[in-house]
Amino acid sequence: MRVLVVEDEPKMRDLLHRGLKEHRYAVDVAATGVDGIWRVEEGTYDAMVLDVRLPDLDGFEVCRRIRAAGRWLPVLMLTALDDVELRVRGLDVGADDYLVKPFHFDELVARLRALLRRGARPRPTTLRVGDLSLDPAGHEVRRGDAPVPLTAKEFALLEYFLRHPDETLSRDRLAEHVWDEAFHGDLHVVNVYVNYLRNKIDRPFGRSSLQTVRGAGFRLRDDTAR
C-alpha cells in the first residue's frame, strides 16, 4: 500500500515516514500543500495523511482541491487543535477521518488500516444531477449558475433525492428519511413538498427533473440527458 504524507514540520514528517515504513507501507512525503496536490494528481496513492497547518495552502484547501479533481483516496487529517469546528470543516471538505496531535502511532496505523479497507469511493462534497447542484456544508442550491433559495425542509428533501438519483422513492420512504420516525401525519404532505420543490428547481427554468412515478412515488433525473 502506498501512502502520501503531507506534513511541513520535519520531525513529524520523519516520524510518520519511518513509522509507516516499519509497518510495511510504501511512503512518499510532501512538505507543502501544492506539492501534495501535485503528487496526488501525478501519482497513485492508496491513502493520504494530511496535516491541517501547512505553509502555503492549509489542509482543508488541499483536501477540497483533490476532491474537486476527482481524486477519492482516503484522507486522514492531522491537527494540533482539538476543535469540533475544525473537525467538521475537515469532514465537510472531504476528509475521511481526523486525528489530534499528539497521538499514539498505533492509533494512527489502525485508523489508516480502517480507511484502506474502505477504499477509494467517490464522496463528492457537492451533490449533482445534471446542472442541479446542492452543497450540504454551505447549504446552497443552484440550477446552473442561478441560486435557488429553499426552506430547511425543502433542502432536506432535495438532498435525499440527490443522494438517490434515478431511484424511485416512495412517499413512506421520503417521510421516514426527511421527516423522522415520529412522523405520523398525512403522507399527502410529501406531495405538497415535492410540488414546492418543483416550483423552485424546475418550473422557473422550464425543466422537469423531479418526476412522478404513478403508483410508486417520485424520482429525480437529469432531464437534459439524451
Image (tube, grey):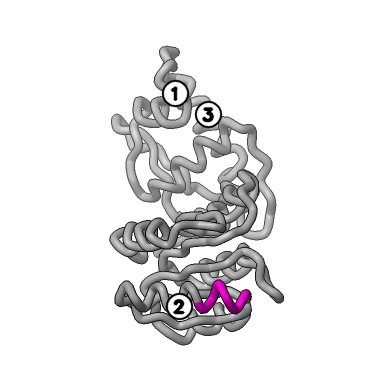
Residue drawn at 56 percent across, 45 percent down: 202
Three-letter code, disc 3: Tyr
Q: Residue at x 54, y 50 (%)?
A: 207
User: Where does residue 12 sit, x and y in percent of width and height?
Assistant: 55, 72
Amino acid on which the number 2 mark rests in the picture: His
Judge depth for marks 1 and 3 and give the one in front.
Answer: 1
N-terminal of the two: label 1 or label 3? Answer: 1
Residue 17's tag is 2
Q: Secondary structure at mark 1?
A: loop
Q: Main secondary structure of the magenta part?
A: helix
In this rendering, would 55 be left or right of 68?
Answer: right
Q: Which residues are magenta?
A: 9-14
Vertical comparison of 181 with 6: above or below? above
Q: CA distance from mark 1 to mark 3?
A: 15 Å
Q: Which mark is residue 193?
A: 3
Residue that appears at 29% across and 61% down: 117
Q: Is residue 158 magenta?
A: no
Residue 133 higher or lower than 23, as above or below: above
Q: Which residue is mark 1?
A: 180
* Closer to us: 209 or 122: 122
